[in-house]
Image (spheres, rainbow, N blue to C red):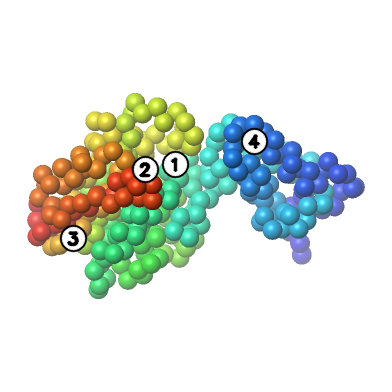
C-alpha cells in the first residue's frame, strides 16, 4: 500500500501549486539572500519535504502539491534564507562519500578534513591497529577510517553527549563498529591501552574571529569551534598529553587553522615528537600537522 504523505495525492490542476512552480517561488528568497546555488538548494529542501530526489522532482514537475507540503517547504526556505546551514535543515552532509547525519550539536563535516583522513590512512600499520579520534563530533573522521580499513580497532571520544549520540547513530546506519567514550580529550581514554594513531580536529578558532558571525559558523556549536589562547589552547591540550597514549612509532595528526602550523609544529617539537611536518589542503594552506612518537613513552 502506498504510505507516502498526501503531498503525492493529486489536486485540481493549478499551475501555482505544481512542483515546478513551487521550486520557482522557493528560489527567489534564496537568491535574494545571496545563496549562489539557489536552484539546487530549493530542490534539496523540497525534496526533503516530499521524500523525492532531484531527478524525481524534475520528472514530476507538473504534479500538484497540497498546501501543507508547500507550507513546510516555504518554512525551510525561510530558515535557509535567514542563514541556517542547509546541512542542518536536511539533517545530513556527505563526507568521504558517506551520508552522515548532522544536527546543531555537532560541526558540519567539511571537505578540508578529508586531508586528515587521507594522511591517517597512509600511516596506518597492518595488523588491527588501534585508532583514536578525539573530539569526534558526528564521527566523520573515525567512520571514514573504519570504512576504508575495517580491520582497525576504532575509538572515538567527545566531551558532548549530544554529539556522541549523533556519531553513534551514524555508526549504526553505516554498520561500522566504533567504541565511543565521553570526556575531555585524552581524559576519556586514560585507562585504555595505547594507540597506533591519534587524530583530532579540535576547536581552533580565536574567540574574537569575526568569521564566527558569518555563514554556517553562526549556527554551529560554539564550544566545538573556538578555543582560548587565539584558538591554540585545545591543540596544545592534545599535543601535550598524546605521547603517553601512543605506541612506539605511533602518529599524532592534528587539523588546525590556516595560520597555526608553525605554532602546532613547535608544540609537537617541545613534546619530543619526531618527523614533525605540516601538510597543505587544496587551497594551499597548511591544514594538518603530524608528529611521530619515537618510543611511545611520555
Report if the CB atoms under discs 1 and 2 are less than 8 Å apart.
yes
Query: What secondary structure is marked by label 3?
Result: strand
* Residue 89 falls left or right of residue 74: left
Q: Is residue 240 above or below residue 52?
A: above
Using the image as rendered, state which of residue 287 and residue 239 is in the foreground: 287
Nearer-N-terminus badge (1/2): 1
User: Residue 134: image x %, image y %?
Assistant: 29, 50
Residue shown at 31% from the left, 63% from the top:
121
Q: CA distance from mark 1 to mark 4?
A: 28 Å
Please report the residue visible at 41 percent of the width from the left and 31 percent of the height from the top. Answer: 211
- In the figure, residue 73 lies in which quadrant? top right
Q: Is residue 257 toward the left or the right of residue 90 in the image? A: left
Measuring from the top left, give residue 6's x and y in whole percent: 78, 51
For the N terminus, which image quadrant? bottom right
Say which residue label 2 marks: 160
Residue occupied by mark 4: 31
Q: SS at mark 4?
A: helix
Query: Which numbered tag is attached to residue 280?
Result: none
Work out whether residue 123 or residue 37 is closer to the camera in this orientation and state it.
37
Give the labeled residue for mark 1: 105
Which residue is identified by label 3? 250
Q: Can residue 138 be spotted in the picture?
A: no
Q: Residue at x 36, y 37 (%)?
A: 225
Label 3 and label 4: CA atoms lie apart by 49 Å
The spot of residue 133 in percent (x, y) is 31, 54
Q: Position of residue 194 (x, y in %)?
A: 18, 59
Mark 1 or 4: the one toward you: 4
Amino acid at each position: 500500500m502506498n504510505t507516502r504523505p498526501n503531498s503525492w495525492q493529486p489536486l485540481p490542476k493549478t499551475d501555482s501549486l505544481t512542483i515546478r512552480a513551487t521550486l520557482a517561488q522557493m528560489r527567489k528568497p534564496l537568491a535574494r539572500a545571496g545563496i549562489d546555488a539557489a536552484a539546487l538548494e530549493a530542490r534539496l529542501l523540497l525534496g526533503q519535504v516530499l521524500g523525492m530526489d532531484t531527478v524525481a522532482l524534475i520528472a514530476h514537475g507538473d504534479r500538484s502539491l497540497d498546501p501543507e507540503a508547500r507550507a513546510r517547504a516555504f518554512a525551510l526556505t525561510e530558515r535557509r534564507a535567514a542563514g541556517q546551514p542547509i546541512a542542518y535543515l536536511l539533517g545530513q552532509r556527505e563526507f568521504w562519500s558517506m551520508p552522515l547525519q548532522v544536527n546543531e550539536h555537532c560541526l558540519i563535516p567539511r571537505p578540508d578534513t578529508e586531508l586528515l583522513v587521507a594522511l591517517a590512512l597512509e600511516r596506518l600499520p597492518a595488523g588491527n591497529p588501534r585508532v583514536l579520534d578525539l573530539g569526534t563530533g558526528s564521527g566523520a573522521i573515525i567512520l571514514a577510517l573504519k570504512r576504508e580499513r575495517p580491520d582497525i580497532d576504532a575509538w572515538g571520544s567527545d566531551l558532548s553527549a549530544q554529539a556522541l549520540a549523533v556519531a553513534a547513530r551514524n555508526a549504526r546506519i553505516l554498520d561500522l563498529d566504533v567504541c565511543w567514550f565521553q570526556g575531555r580529550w585524552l581524559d576519556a581514554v586514560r585507562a585504555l591501552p595505547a594507540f597506533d594513531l591519534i587524530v583530532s580536529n579540535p576547536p581552533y578558532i580565536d574567540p574574537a574571529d569575526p568569521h564566527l558571525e558569518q555563514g554556517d559558523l553562526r549556527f554551529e556549536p560554539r564550544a566545538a569551534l573556538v578555543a582560548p589562547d587565539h584558538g591554540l589552547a585545545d591543540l596544545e591540550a592534545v599535543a601535550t598529553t598524546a605521547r603517553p597514549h601512543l605506541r612506539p612509532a605511533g602518529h599524532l595528526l592534528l587539523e588546525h587553522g590556516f595560520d597555526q602550523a608553525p605554532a602546532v609544529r613547535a608544540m609537537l617539537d617541545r613534546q619530543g615528537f619526531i618527523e614533525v611536518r605540516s601538510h597543505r589542503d587544496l587551497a594551499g594552506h597548511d591544514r594538518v600537522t603530524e608528529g611521530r612518537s619515537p618510543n611511545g613513552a611520555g
